[in-house]
Image (spheres, rainbow, N blue to C red):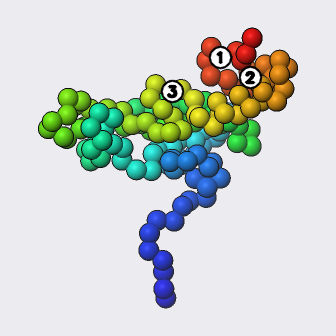
Amino acid sequence: MIEPTGVAADAATILFNLPDYHVTSTSVTAGRRQVIVETDHPPGCPSCGVIASRRKERRFQRLRDIPVAGAVDVLWSKYRWYCEEVACDRLSFFESTSQVPRRARSTTRLRDQLVEAVIRSGRAGRNQLPASRCPGGWSGPR
């Protein structure tokens, strides 16, 4: 029997469809769905660009994201990595991606969707922001 080599994407990751991430766990507690995600590849140091190979610690960061068949609580299993480049001043760093840049608390796809809703709806679009679990403090255009 011939079997393909490589890693096949799991169904949850395909359905959740968050670029650069894969789903590691899902659960439903008290009617709330929770998805835990991790990044697909080890990051490069933001200062020198060397790809990290040693993890230092892990934290869970709650992310605001678009509803996927209803409200979803997204937790990112986010790692702090060592920078092993001797010439680099940075000793460690937390990973970030294009979907969740440094210090962001919401995904890029949520922000893009909110901006698009406000542009299409004008002032009435502000009513959609709370329903979309809008990023904290942002109330749309004034």
The answer to whether residue 85 is left or right of residue 69 is left
Residue at 14%, 38% in the rendered image: 86
The answer to whether residue 136 of the structure is visible from this angle is yes
Q: Amino acid at mark 1?
A: Trp
Q: With respect to residue 119, does 74 lie above or below?
A: below
Q: Amino acid at mark 2?
A: Leu
Residue 136 at what x, y percent from top left?
Answer: 61, 17
Query: Where 138 sits versus 57, above or below?
Result: above
| Residue at image coords 62%, 49% | 17
Residue that carries the numbered disc 3 in the rendered image: 104
| Alpha carbon distance from label 2 to label 1 | 9 Å
Q: Under tag 1, what secondary structure?
A: loop
Point 48% across, 85% down: residue: 2
Give the Cα separation between the discs numbered 3 and 2: 17 Å
Image quadrant in which you'd find residue 139: top right
Mark number for residue 138?
1
Image position, residue 91 (x, y; %): 22, 31
Q: Are marks 2 and 1 in contact (CB under 8 Å)?
A: yes
